[in-house]
């Protein structure tokens, strides 16, 4: 049983990752210790509410949800042009309402610190968002991230261009200082970059089939409508080479945790540029002189996309059933 603390900024792909995880909870393979919400795809109060709604939808309504730490310095606009004004493909009104109050929710950094101090070495931190919350926890309690079993991040781009600037991936570019502090924390890091996540197109056809098999299921209906919305923006921004579907970047972390056979890794030293007119958020690996001695992370470099997407479909199907 994997104990997980998930840091997320829902986000269409965060939503798929959170539903996949809840399927694994239902199957007895995962425990959600807490969900911390970050500012990123949309603002902090919106990501908080979406996380609460997605937990309600997926059957984990009892899990603690924490609010984002104060806004990161931010050079970037949010990503509502991709994920909708509410981050949920403009579908939040169709999701179960959440009665939780953002104002009085615990702060993400405290939730991270409490969870990791209570169970040192046992909890895996899963980062699906800019790293402001994790960095804030590390700043408040230096060394805290080393108490995580692993810190698994959707972050960066190495062999490919970025998705938000030519050089940078969104989670890296939104708060580069925070990413730097996590990369330098000495924690057991697993980094899953665009190099692998851009292979993962969740197809419109898959969502349609799920819904037609279970037309009454609120989850199936939501996934289908979300996919419809996200497909439109993905096509507009040419993210999927014309294929109908959308990139489920964040879901790759779940694959690593529960189906690692779908991925290949290399051990590497990952660094990030925190400044620069064009380069803030640029992540890179030093490959000179076989520089593996300094490695700070396992970095995903290949994915069996068909296998991964088939498993995702089957697990979502189990949650729906
Ligand atoms: C990452 O950025 C966000 O927009 C997605 O949710 C994902 O976490 C991909 O670059
Ligand atoms: Ca995300």
Image (tube, helix red, strand yellow):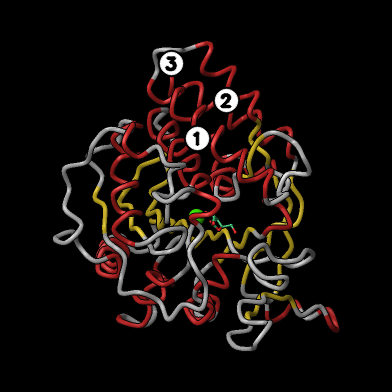
User: Residue at coordinates 61% horizontally, 77% vertically from top-left?
Assistant: 281
Q: Which residue is mark 2?
A: 207
Could you tell me which secondary element the residue under label 3 belongs to?
A: loop
Q: Quadrant of the C terminus?
A: top left
Q: Which residue is mark 3?
A: 321
Q: CA distance from mark 2 to mark 3?
A: 14 Å
Q: Residues within 10 Å of mark 3 (few under 14, many from 20)?
A: few
Q: Nearer the viewer, residue 164 or 284?
A: 164
Q: Is residue 85 above or below residue 216?
A: below
Q: Residues within 10 Å of mark 1 (few under 14, many from 20)?
A: many
Q: Is mark 1 within 8 Å of ligand 1?
A: no
> Which callout, 2 or 1, points to the residue nearer the camera?
1
Q: Which residue is mark 1?
A: 226
How far across and down, in percent of the image, does residue 171 sit? 54, 65
How far across and down, in percent of the image, does residue 285 sit? 73, 75
Task: Spot the residue most to the right.
Answer: 289
């Amino acid at each position: 049983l994997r104990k997980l603390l998930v840091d997320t900024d829902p986000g269409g792909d965060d939503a798929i990752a959170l539903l996949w995880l809840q399927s694994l909870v239902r199957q007895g393979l995962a425990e959600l210790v807490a969900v911390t919400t970050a500012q990123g795809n949309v603002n902090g109060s919106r990501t908080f509410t979406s996380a609460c709604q997605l937990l309600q939808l997926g059957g984990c309504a009892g899990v603690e949800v924490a609010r984002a730490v104060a806004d990161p310095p931010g050079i970037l606009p949010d990503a509502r042009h991709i994920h909708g004004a509410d981050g949920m493909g403009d579908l939040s009104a169709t999701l179960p309402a959440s009665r939780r109050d953002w104002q009085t929710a615990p702060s993400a950094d405290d939730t991270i610190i409490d969870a990791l101090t209570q169970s040192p070495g046992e909890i895996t931190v899963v980062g699906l968002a800019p790293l402001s919350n994790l960095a804030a926890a590390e700043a408040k309690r230096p060394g805290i991230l080393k108490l995580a079993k692993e810190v698994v991040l959707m972050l960066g781009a190495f062999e490919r261009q970025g998705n938000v600037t030519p050089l940078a991936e969104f989670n890296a570019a939104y708060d580069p200082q925070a990413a730097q502090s996590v990369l330098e924390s000495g924690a057991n890091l697993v980094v899953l970059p665009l190099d692998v996540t851009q292979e993962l197109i969740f197809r419109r056809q898959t969502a349609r089939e799920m819904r037609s098999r279970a037309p009454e299921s609120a989850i199936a209906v939501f996934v289908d409508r979300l996919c419809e919305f996200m497909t439109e923006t993905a096509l507009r921004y040419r993210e999927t080479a014309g294929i109908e579907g959308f990139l489920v970047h964040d879901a790759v972390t779940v694959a690593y945790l529960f189906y690692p056979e779908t991925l290949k890794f290399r051990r590497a030293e990952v660094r990030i540029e925190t400044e620069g007119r064009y380069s803030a958020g640029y992540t890179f690996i030093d490959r000179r002189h076989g520089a593996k001695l300094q490695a700070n992370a396992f970095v995903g470099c290949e994915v069996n996309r068909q296998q991964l997407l088939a498993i995702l479909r089957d697990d979502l199907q189990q949650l729906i059933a």
